[in-house]
Amino acid sequence: MVAIDPAKVAVQTGFKRKNPKTDLFKKRFGWGLGMQYVAKSDLSTGNTTFASHVLKSHDLVFAFTAPYSQRIENNKESKVPCAWYRPEDGLKFIEAHGLGVRAVGVLVEDAAEAHRQATAHGARSALEPQTLRDEASSTEQVVAEVELYGDVVLRFVSGSFQGAFLAGYTPVESPPLSYGIKRLDHAVGNVPKPREKLKYIAEAMGFHEFAEFTAEDVGPKIGDVLTPEQYKEVKELGILVDKDDQGVLLQIFRKPLSDRPTLFVEIIQRIGCIYESAAAERGQPEPVLEQAGGCGGFGKGNFSELFKSIEDYERTLDN
């Protein structure tokens, strides 16, 4: 099965949107999420195939990408870092989904081997292993993809390249910026026949079922989790609170990120569930403190409130 070292997992989330090269991009996504603008590939770097801009906060990386006109697709002079990119596929994705996540990337020891093992266990290949080279650092990077769900792919990334995103992108100098967002905790995708998709992902990619609940589940009461002062503060900020038998979850949901309500971001904080890991597990000289995955649950007690908020928001839209 696919071996992913948790100590090396980072996330590269590839979005598709119509016009990433605007001040609105930097304000809404950079300042709005507190993520530093770190890399790009567009007309200014010689890429006449697509425009792509990369934001980063700690281990979390977002890349916003959109195709240029198909009339210049076959320009042989285009300095495109991803030779496999097809503008017609990008346009088709935008038409179907608006602003949405196309690729979720994870760092692995060997992307080609991860792809081989995944496809051997039933994963459908979306991109055979490709080698990217960074001329400035003389390093390489291997990228491969398998189908995840719908039009979304899981991207395996490995290699000696240490840049912010993919080899071939141009670094961007910009002021440091972070509001404290550190990593991707989980990604939610709405799919038909979820049991079939769960079986596919588990068997092909080595993931296991971590938690299960429905929108009808009733979460535990928060009881004495918060002091009166803390309760007043979270209420004023609109923060939702939930807990499980191990810890506490604080969560807040942003409004959809574009004019079509196809994507929103949930910002969470997990409290508790700290344990001392064995030094040998991470190659550390001494044990380190870590937080158990999923500490505090996934907000099942707030699902009804979330869906009600989404429906209320959609009723304010013209369409």
Image (spheres, rainbow, N blue to C red):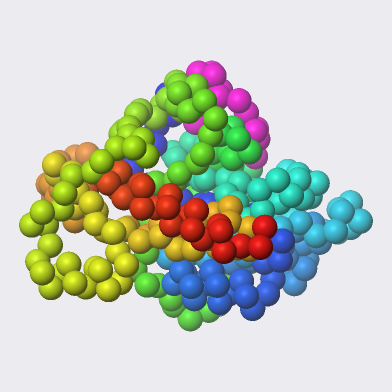
Question: In the image shown, does 13 or 316 lie closer to the viewer?
Answer: 316
As displayed, is residue 55 above or below residue 70? below
Residue 254: quadrant of the picture: bottom left
Relative placement, left or right, of 268 versus 158 is left
Residue 166 visible in the displayed image = no
Residue drawn at x 25%, y 68% as measured from the top left: 235
Query: Position of 310 compared to 102: left or right?
Result: left
Residue 121 among those drawn in magenta: yes
Where is residue 35 drawn, in percent x and y?
Answer: 47, 69
Name the residue nearer the viewer: 238 or 145: 238
Residue 154 vs 313, above or below: the answer is above
- Counting from the top left corner in percent of width and height, residue 15 is at 60, 54
Q: Residue furthest top?
A: 121
Q: Is residue 173 above or below residue 96?
A: below
User: Which quarter of the rendered picture does the C terminus lie within?
Assistant: bottom right
Say if 70 sits above or below 119 in the image. below
User: Residue sitting at 76 percent across and 56 percent down?
Assistant: 67
Q: Is residue 186 visible?
A: yes
Q: Is residue 198 left or right of residue 153?
A: left
State the residue at coordinates (55%, 57%). 314
Where residue 286 appears, x then y in whole percent? 13, 50
**Residue interval drawn in magenta:** 112-130
Image quarter in which the N terminus is found: top left
Q: Position of residue 182 (x, y in %)?
A: 36, 61
Q: Quadrant of residue 294?
A: top left
- Which image quadrant for residue 292? top left
Foreground residue among 150 and 117: 150
Outermost residue to the right: 71
What residue do we see at 72% from left, 61% from top?
Answer: 18
